[in-house]
Amino acid sequence: MADFAALFKDQWSKLDSATAAVLNRIYTGAEGETPIFMRSPEGARDLINRLLPFYVSAGAPAIAHIEERLIPAASGDIRIRLYDPGVPAPGPAIVFLHGGGFVVCDIDVYDGVARQLAKRSGMRVVSVDYALAPEHPFPVPLNDCIAAIRWIATHGGEWGIDPARIAVAGDSAGANLALAATIALRDAGNSPVRGAACIYGCYAPDLNTQSEKDFGGGPYLVMTPEMAWYWNYYLSKAADRTNPLAAPLHADLRGLPPLFLTASEYDPLHDDTTMLVEKLKAAGSAFEFHLWTGTIHASVNLMGWIPAMGPRVDEVCAFLKRVTDRP
């Protein structure tokens, strides 16, 4: 097996030192493991469930109250999990949609991220365990997320949530789902979403971008063949690849609530966000864009290992508080 520290020394030298150190640890710990894109979905989930929680759980804070509930959705009954940091009710809430390429991860793997969001924002967080592809390809995961947002807007008072003060957040595939759900709810009318934070998202299945060419070869955790693997499982029909709710870069972006967008500098998905920024400018929509220099995809998952990520996540939380505090 390759000595990754030697193989990727030059590439990792450009990163934040803590990011480089945790990458070295991850790659060393995964020695001998078959890459995700060479596995079945079940095999990929096994890898993620064995390796990722250790990193995501680092530094995760205690939360005053955590509670789960089953709600009806497109795929059947799905889990949603409340993280209540012990703030007055009724109050605003973040609906959080986890990443994982639409195929892997769940609310258990992302427990540490949800805890960080609740603690740092001082807001209730509801994490959504939407169904995964390929068992449930597009549009089922998206429709699960929309159902969860609507359920929270209707029933969230039972959890101390003000239905008029709901924001959405997601990372990677979860950012795609957060944006697509915001678009779908806008189109349906009377949307409860006051704003959305979209963290290093994948917004179209275009793998010929410059950032895929520059950063998709292996050193930076996510590889271009892995992204192709995810998209191919999520989009079961050729027409889905340009459907604006599957690939929001193709959507009408006018009339959306405020968006908070981030891209990591050394991320194959970097250009997805910069292209989205240009389309939002053309649409005249309100947004903030933050480039996270010196770091990689999944850096929020690794925030317990990367000190620079704490202030960056605090900026995400400040935005979510701001859009849900306004009249």
Image: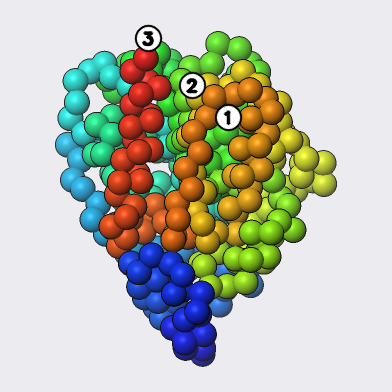
The residue to which callout 2 is attached is 193
- Observer-side mark, 2 or 3, equals 3
Residue 40 tag number: none
* Element under disc 3: loop
Of mark 3 and mark 1, the one earlier in the sequence is: 1
- Relative horizontal placement of residue 126, taking residue 181 as reference (left or right): left
Q: Are marks 1 and 2 in contact (CB under 8 Å)?
A: yes
Q: Which is more toward the observer, 82 or 227? A: 227
Residue 327's disc number: 3
State the residue position of label 1: 181
The residue at the point 23 percent across, 56 percent down is 59
Secondary structure of residue under mark 1: helix
Q: Quadrant of residue 286?
A: top right
Name the N-terminal-most of marks 2 and 3.
2
> Crowdedness of circle 1 by 10 Å Cα count: few (<14), some, many (20+)?
many
55 w.r.t. 126: above or below: below
Q: Quadrant of residue 208?
A: bottom right
**Can you tell which of label 3 and label 1 is closer to the viewer?**
3
Foreground: 305 or 34?
305
Amino acid identity at mark 2: Val
Q: Residue at x 31, y 40 (%)?
A: 314
